């Protein structure tokens, strides 16, 4: 792969992306248009996140990629391999060892630090999109802070279901100004967005938008005073490591509908198991 | 005991090896050469160049081979390669009036300077399978004559001279570059044409067809369709003048559309325009119809709410690489968001069940 | 007394065609102004200019804002004008579908303006919506139903509730009873008259129906070909029209 530049993109493109990132950091939650490039992987498969990572990676970085919380899902493997080949950076699966973490759909369980950057892959950056399909109109709504419609949606949920029926990509208000889509993370992860020590960067390749949360930004999930936001998860401990406080995947284990719940964050789960924590279905005894 | 699925890396490698084997197919059959694709699958090569926005028949042929004939996949390969190429600058606008035409037809005039030239077209072939091709593809040489000397003037120029068609004034401002700047609406005509030139052929065809059936009908006549080679010239700063750097084959379609006029302005025909790499005539005609439909606003026409009039709808959905990527991404794991929906639906059903049980008890 | 709205020389042309020309008037708090004329007389163009939907070519529309006193709404910034549009102003469309969100429940429709200005208590929003549905005589049990399931008269009453819920000071109405059955019209007019009185609303009502203005309007302007041909107290204009066109309008109604 020597005919390609470090981290695939040419330096001019990286500078353009870095300018968009800086602008995003200066106006937290604002979607900055950028001239997304065609990447050698399909749009919708993380091209936004990949371009952001390519623009910020340095040869000294240690890179981690997760998809659904796991390092070994196929698309995470594919993106990690891409940067191993094009940037030659060191990679890791350990959250605490990584300086840049690219993620799809999750925030790691382990709190991040000021020395880390979390890069999100974003499919639809516009939180108003499913209420208003026109970009020209949604941009105006952001500019004029006309967000009443967002609460109409929540109101309708409660009147119909008794609850706010949004469980992922749950919209947030950033620093009391912009309403932002946090990418399709489960709402369980929403509380981690605010006041985070690490820089959070969001890249949407196909939709040509970058947005950002600088460290320690105030992020509030939309709700009503009498129907407050609730970060929920399956009401089980992890079957492998016994964790009570982590987000869980449900796995069907037999034809009779038997299932178990395991941490979606594989690094977190493995570390706990290595430290001697054992869930009901984990460990050697159960084998 | 349950063990989380591992080994994504090996699975991917093995899948790629299998893919390569399948691409080659039965090894007792001779392998397809790039030159064979370039020469004998020329219209596929042209489409890949047009929608890939890169004029290089050999690379397009390679992409088609690598993509196992999946043209959208081939276009994707070309686009991803194109992104990495350095930009030296922009050429001079090509002069299609000086095109060496292989084909040139007008549906508006029976005869005209430059003549009607059918060229290598399927138009009047009877669509009967030619079983001879299954055995032996040798063909007799087609009759030839010398090319007519001189430029072939545009039909619209004749109309323009009489003031019968709207002016298309020369505009020397640099057009925006869709591949360097994010696409934003409202988009001017130059940007719309640029997007349409690389738009998916099927999508453009469907939209154009919808205008013909009444969704923003604009009564298009093919004023002229021409296919042939034009030279590409570029200003070289060190030289201080433009030199020819190569030749590209293009298809150009100019439509003459319904006229407009008012009490103060006499009626005039209006224009639609299509220009596409290669011999891509279906695409070029479609492009001209869609271009014309998108111009409703500047021409003071009504928005009848037709899809082909909606620039935001057309431009944001015309790119097949964006569309296919996002469509196919739903194959990727969505365990996490699905799990959160699962929890929610269970909770809501549980509460609904409790309500019903209580009502029954009352 | 400061007028709530002071309209000065509003002109709007469409090419060579005149939408409305040189219209001026004042509207005082609690006053209802009727604008009548046949279709094409420019009354709807004028209303859209006043409400900020269409930018007039010349003229000023000065509104006595709560915060800063009289301001020209034609030259104020779009965010300010849109803010007025969802707080102190209301606009009732002739076709309820243009003024409602048809995919959102009746409660959500009424609650939207409250949420747009910052209401964040679901229970309170719902109580207010229930209260307003009752005020416009829509069965509160229909609060979670979508307007698509409502009759034309109910949709129009819902639109009025949605508009009045934030307690606007000025209501623009474009043929509010147009397209409704006569019996339904009478009930709606009755309701509107009650609301205007109880809330002390100021309103500008555009209509071609003289019965509507007779019942609701304190003052009247008659428009023809984009110009105001006669203005005065409603009773005065209707009972003793001076301009030939007003006479024609009044007589044509009386004949029915």
Image: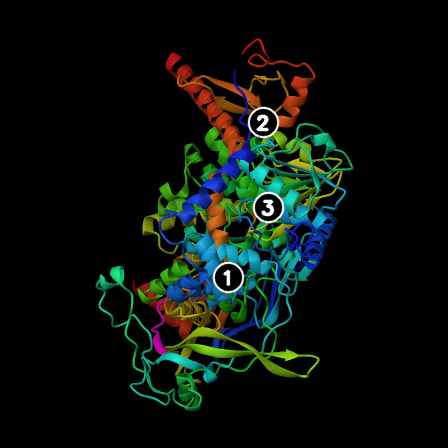
Task: Compare marks 3 and 2 and give the one earlier in the sequence.
Answer: 3
Q: Which mark is residue A264?
A: 2
Chain that bears disc 3: A
Q: Image point 35% across, 68% down: which residue?
A: B217
Boundaries of the magenta span? B216-223
Tell me which corner region of the image, top left, top right, bottom left or bottom right, holds residue A198: top right
Residue A98 at what x, y percent from top left?
72, 35
Rendered position, B12 above or below A14: above
Q: Is residue B313 visible?
A: no
Magenta: main secondary structure equals: loop
- Please state which of the two labelled residues, at mark 3 or mark 1, is closer to the viewer: 1
Residue A182 at what x, y percent from top left?
61, 40
Rendered position, A270 above or below B106: above
Element at badge 2? loop
Question: Which residue lies under the disc numbered 1?
Answer: B59
Inter-mark Cα distance, 3 to 1: 49 Å
Could you tell whether A255 is left or right of A202 in the image?
A: left
C235 or A2: nearer the eye? A2
Q: Image point 61% across, 26% down: which residue?
A: A266
Rendered position, B29 above or below B97: above
Residue B294 included in the magenta stretch of the image: no
B88 or A199: nearer the eye? B88
Q: Is residue A22 visible?
A: yes
Within-10-Å neighbours for mark 2: few <14, some 14–19, many 20+? many
- Report whether mark 3 lies on the same chain as mark 1: no
Residue A179 at what x, y percent from top left?
63, 44
Question: Which residue lies under the disc numbered 3?
Answer: A147
């Amino acid at each position: 792969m020597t005919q390609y530049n470090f981290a695939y993109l040419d330096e001019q493109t990286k500078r353009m992306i870095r300018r968009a990132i800086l602008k995003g950091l200066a106006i937290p939650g604002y979607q900055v248009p950028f001239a997304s490039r065609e990447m050698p992987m399909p749009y919708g498969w993380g091209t936004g996140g990949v371009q952001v990572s390519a623009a910020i990676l340095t040869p000294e970085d240690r890179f981690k990629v997760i998809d659904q919380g796991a390092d070994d899902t196929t698309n995470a493997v594919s993106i990690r391999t891409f940067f191993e080949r094009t940037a030659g950076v060191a990679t890791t699966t350990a959250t605490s060892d990584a300086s840049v973490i690219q993620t799809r759909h999750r925030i790691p369980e382990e709190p991040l630090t000021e020395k880390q950057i979390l890069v999100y892959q974003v499919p639809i950056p516009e939180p108003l999109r499913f209420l208003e399909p026109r970009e020209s109109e949604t941009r105006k709504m952001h500019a004029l802070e006309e967000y009443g419609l967002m609460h109409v949606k929540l109101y309708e949920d409660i009147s119909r279901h008794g609850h706010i029926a949004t469980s992922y990509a749950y919209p947030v208000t950033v620093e009391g100004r912009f309403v932002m889509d946090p990418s399709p993370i489960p709402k369980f992860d929403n509380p981690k967005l605010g006041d985070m020590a690490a820089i959070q960067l969001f890249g949407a390749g196909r939709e040509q938008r970058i947005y950002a949360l600088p460290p320690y930004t105030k992020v509030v999930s939309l709700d009503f005073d009498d129907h407050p936001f609730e970060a929920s998860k399956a009401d089980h401990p992890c079957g492998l490591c016994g964790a009570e406080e982590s987000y869980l995947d449900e796995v069907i284990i037999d034809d009779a509908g038997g299932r178990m719940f395991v941490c979606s964050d594989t690094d977190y789960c493995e570390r706990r198991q290595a430290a001697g924590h054992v869930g009901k279905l984990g460990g050697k005894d159960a084998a | 005991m349950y063990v989380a699925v591992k080994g994504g890396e090996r699975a991917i490698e093995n899948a790629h090896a299998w893919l390569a084997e399948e691409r080659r197919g039965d090894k007792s059959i001779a392998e397809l050469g790039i030159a064979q694709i370039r020469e004998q699958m020329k219209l596929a090569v042209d489409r890949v160049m047009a929608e890939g926005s890169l004029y290089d028949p050999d690379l397009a042929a390679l992409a088609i081979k690598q993509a196992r004939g999946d043209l959208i996949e081939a276009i994707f390969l070309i686009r991803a390669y194109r992104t990495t190429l350095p930009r030296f600058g922009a050429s001079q606008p090509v002069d299609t009036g000086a095109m060496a035409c292989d084909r040139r037809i007008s549906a508006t005039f029976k005869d005209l300077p430059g003549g009607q030239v059918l060229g290598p077209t399927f138009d009047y072939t009877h669509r009967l399978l030619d079983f001879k091709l299954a055995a032996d593809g040798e063909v007799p040489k087609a009759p030839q004559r010398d090319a007519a000397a001189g430029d072939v003037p545009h039909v619209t120029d004749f109309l323009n001279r009489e003031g019968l068609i709207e002016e298309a004034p020369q505009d020397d401002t640099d057009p925006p570059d869709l591949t360097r700047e994010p696409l934003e609406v409202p988009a001017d005509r130059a940007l719309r044409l640029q997007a349409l030139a690389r738009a998916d052929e099927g999508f453009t065809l469907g939209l154009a067809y919808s205008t013909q059936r009444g969704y923003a009908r604009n009564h298009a006549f093919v004023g002229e369709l021409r296919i042939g080679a034009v030279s590409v010239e570029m200003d070289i700063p060190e030289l201080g003048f433009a030199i020819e750097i190569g030749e590209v084959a293009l298809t150009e379609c100019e439509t003459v559309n319904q006229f407009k006029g008012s009490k103060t302005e006499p009626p005039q025909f209006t224009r639609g325009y299509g220009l596409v790499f290669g011999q891509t005539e279906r695409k070029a005609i479609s492009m001209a119809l869609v271009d014309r439909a998108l111009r409703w606003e500047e021409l003071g026409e009504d928005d009848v709410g037709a899809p082909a009039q909606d620039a935001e709808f057309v431009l944001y959905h015309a790119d097949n690489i964006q569309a296919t990527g996002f469509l196919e991404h739903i194959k990727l794991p969505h365990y996490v968001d699905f799990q959160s929906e699962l929890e929610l639906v269970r909770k809501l059903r549980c509460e609904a069940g409790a309500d019903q049980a209580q009502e029954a008890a009352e | 007394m400061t007028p709530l709205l002071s309209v000065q020389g509003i002109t709007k042309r469409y090419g060579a065609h005149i939408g409305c020309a040189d219209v001026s008037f004042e509207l005082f708090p609690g006053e209802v102004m009727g604008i009548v004329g046949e279709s094409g007389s420019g009354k709807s163009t004028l209303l859209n200019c006043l409400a900020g939907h269409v930018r007039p070519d010349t003229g000023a529309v000065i509104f006595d804002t709560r915060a800063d006193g009289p301001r020209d709404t034609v030259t104020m910034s779009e965010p300010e004008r849109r803010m007025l549009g969802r707080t102190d102003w209301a606009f009732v469309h002739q076709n309820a579908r243009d003024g409602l969100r048809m995919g959102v429940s009746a409660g959500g429709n009424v609650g939207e303006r409250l949420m747009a200005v910052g209401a964040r208590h679901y229970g309170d929003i719902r109580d207010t919506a229930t209260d307003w549905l009752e005020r416009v005589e829509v069965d509160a049990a229909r609060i979670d139903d979508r307007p698509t399931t409502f009759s034309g008269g109910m949709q129009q009453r819902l639109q009025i509730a949605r508009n009045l819920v934030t307690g606007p000071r000025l209501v623009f109405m474009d043929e509010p009873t147009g397209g409704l059955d006569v019996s339904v019209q009478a009930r709606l007019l009755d309701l509107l008259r009650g609301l205007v009185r109880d809330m002390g609303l100021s309103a500008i009502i555009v209509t071609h129906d003289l019965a509507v203005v007779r019942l609701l309007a304190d003052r009247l302007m008659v428009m023809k070909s984009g110009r105001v041909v006669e203005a005065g107290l409603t009773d005065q204009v209707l009972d003793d029209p001076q301009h030939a066109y007003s006479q024609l309008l009044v007589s044509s109604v009386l004949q029915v």
